[in-house]
Amino acid sequence: MIRTELMRTVPLTATGYEIETEMIIKLVRAGATLERVPVQRLAYQNARSHMRPVRDTFRTCMLALGYRYFPGRT
């Protein structure tokens, strides 16, 4: 869960699955704290994933590296 007022202060640029990584990094930089919440059950009712494992993982890793080594540009 994310407080709406904090989320509104964070500009997001990602357009794919990497947006989750961008949100976490930017929210923590804005002062948010993270907590783990257990998920009991997840059901997609035979829906197919739209994730492309290689491409999406690469994009997420590149985004995280960009935030790590070029924090002023992101």
Image (tube, rainbow, N blue to C red):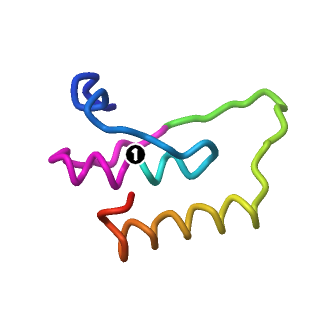
Which residue occupies 23% across, 31% down? 6
Question: Element under label 1?
Answer: helix
24 left or right of 28 in image:
right
65 vs 43: above or below: below
**What residue do we see at 49% from left, 47% from top?**
20
Is the residue marked by circle 1 packed among few (<14), some (14-19), or many (20+) residues within 10 Å?
A: some
What residue did someone put label 1 on? Answer: 23
Task: Indicate whether 39 appears above or below 5.
Answer: below
Question: Which quarter of the image is occupied by the C terminus?
Answer: bottom left
Near-viewer residue (11 or 36)? 11
Q: Which residue is drawn at 46% across and 54% down?
A: 21
**At x 19% / y 44%, what residue is drawn?**
32
Count of numbered tags? 1
Q: Which residue lies furthest to the top in this view?
A: 4
Residue 19, given in percent of the width and then of the height, sits at 52, 46
**Image quarter for residue 38?**
top left
Q: Is residue 74 left or right of residue 18?
A: left
Please identify the quadrant where the N terminus is shown.
Answer: top left
**In-image side of 70 versus 39 (left or right):** left
Given the current orientation, which residue lies at the most extreme front position?
73
Nearest to the observer: residue 65 or residue 57:
65
Residue farthest left in this picture: 31
30 drawn magenta: yes
Front one among 70 and 7:
70
Image coordinates of residue 54 in percent, x first then y, are 76, 67
In x, y percent, where is residue 4? 28, 22
Residue stretch in magenta:
23-39
Type of amino acid under label 1: Met
Residue 62, given in percent of the width and then of the height, sits at: 55, 69
